[in-house]
């Protein structure tokens, strides 16, 4: 049926196909191309989503960094004070609008996180890393020692993290592996709390801030939550094709009329719809390209949106996908050139313009269409 309407003939014999279409213009041809484009575009999105893995965290990103937003989760030890700080915190998409501040007059400070229920950090499918951002603004002295304790009920295990807390007055980003390299045996499948202890050489007014506490290191396929995205992508594909079809047809009609051509709206619109067979071809190539691209992992650093961290994580992802991006960009340029050539053939057959005028009209009309389309999509 598709061949009967000359859809694929536009690809291998465009001059002959457009001549036949101009003699008997029917909207069903572009409509079928639109359906093919939507199916191919959704398939392309599925191929892309199937290669994407997103880091899962606890608390979940929907809850932001819950444990460093609410001081009720913390128990300061040895007489330390605890408040929520709304002026000095990590600014990011999933980091809320405050940090937890602790202060004490002593040579050490110890704070404990509790009431987090049970967290699976075992090697069998559990969280593999602990993320925590720590900043101390007083005293301006090197740390003597810093330790992180993990609790499972009444049992505990600890790890020295002094080397990860070397910078005074700035946020230190801790990424601590779990289960391995800790002193003491606990049930890593049932983590119920943690404690941070920091020690200095002499007594001072200690002030420490904590933010961005997450268990992470486990990646889940984005496809598991992408069903809604695919439905929206299909609707967006329909809007994209329809908008571009009518814009291209309208702009071509106006331009040809400016050159005094006796064009017919129905003919121009149907021809414009057939030139967009290139959108279907591009979607098919994209689906094939995405199906063989490497698996891409989107870590907390990227999705968290912290300035600097997100850019560095994105740069790494792009380095892993450079071949896919190169192919995609090359195909996009080739499709633009091909579409302009098809438009020029359509203009030539429907107006009897010279090839130079037809090519110029097609070029200006096509890129004017893309400009208007981008403008309308951003409004």
Image (spheres, rainbow, N blue to C red):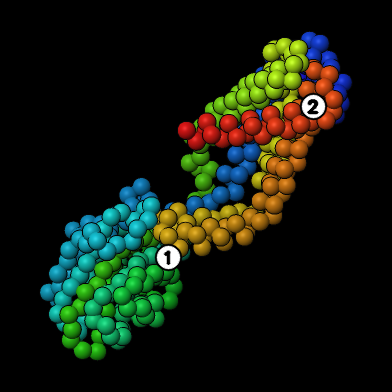
On-image quarter of the N terminus: top right
- Residue 129 is tagged as 1
When asked about the image quadrant of residue 82, the answer is bottom left
Residue 184 percent location from the top left of the image: 34, 77
Q: Secondary structure at mark 1?
A: strand
Give the image quarter of residue 109.
Answer: bottom left
Q: Is residue 195 above or below residue 162?
A: above
Residue that appears at 18% across and 84% down: 204
> Relative to the observer, which residue lies in front, 80 or 167?
167
Q: Residues within 10 Å of mark 1 (few under 14, many from 20)?
A: some
**Vertical position of residue 135 compared to residue 96: above or below:** below
Name the spot of residue 89 as percent of width and height, x first: 29, 62
User: Of 362 and 122, which appears nearest the observer?
Assistant: 362
Q: At 74% from the left edge and 23% from the top edge, which residue is drawn?
A: 274
Where, by quadrant of the figure, is residue 307 drawn? bottom left
Residue count near mark 2 (Cα–Cα under 10 Å), binned few <14, some 14–19, many ≥20: many
Residue 233 percent location from the top left of the image: 55, 33
């Amino acid at each position: 049926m598709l061949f009967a309407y000359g859809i694929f003939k536009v690809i291998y014999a465009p001059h002959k196909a457009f001549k036949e279409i101009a003699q008997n213009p029917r909207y069903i041809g572009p409509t079928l191309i639109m359906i093919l484009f939507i199916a191919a575009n959704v398939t392309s999105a599925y191929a892309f989503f199937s290669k994407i893995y997103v880091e899962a965290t606890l608390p979940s990103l929907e809850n932001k960094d819950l444990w460093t937003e609410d001081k009720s989760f913390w128990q300061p030890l040895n007489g330390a004070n605890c408040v929520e700080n709304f002026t000095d915190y990590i600014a990011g998409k999933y980091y809320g609008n405050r940090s937890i501040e602790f202060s004490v007059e002593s040579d050490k400070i110890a704070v404990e996180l509790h009431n987090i229920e049970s967290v699976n950090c075992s090697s069998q499918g559990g969280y593999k890393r602990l993320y925590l951002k720590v900043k101390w603004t007083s005293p301006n002295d090197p740390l003597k020692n810093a330790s992180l304790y993990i609790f499972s009920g009444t049992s505990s295990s600890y790890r020295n993290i002094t080397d990860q807390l070397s910078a005074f007055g700035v946020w230190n980003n801790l990424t601590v592996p779990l289960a391995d390299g800790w002193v003491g045996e606990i049930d890593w499948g049932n983590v119920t709390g943690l404690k941070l202890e920091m020690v200095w050489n002499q007594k001072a007014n200690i002030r420490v801030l904590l933010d961005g506490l997450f268990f992470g290191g486990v990646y889940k396929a984005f496809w598991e939550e992408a069903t809604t995205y695919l439905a929206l992508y299909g609707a967006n594909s329909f809007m994209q094709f329809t908008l571009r079809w009518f814009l291209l047809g309208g702009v071509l009609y106006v331009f040809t009329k400016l050159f005094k051509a006796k064009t017919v709206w129905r003919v121009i619109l149907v021809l414009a719809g057939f030139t967009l067979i290139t959108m279907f071809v591009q979607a098919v190539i994209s689906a094939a390209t995405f199906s063989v691209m490497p698996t891409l992992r989107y870590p907390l650093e990227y999705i968290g949106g912290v300035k600097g961290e997100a850019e560095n994580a994105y740069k790494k992802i792009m380095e892993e996908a450079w071949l896919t991006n190169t192919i995609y960009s090359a195909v996009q340029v080739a499709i633009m050139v091909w579409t302009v050539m098809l438009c020029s053939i359509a203009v030539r057959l429907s107006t009897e313009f010279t090839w130079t005028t037809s090519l110029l009209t097609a070029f200006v009309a096509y890129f004017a269409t893309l400009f208007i389309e981008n403008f309308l999509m951003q409004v």
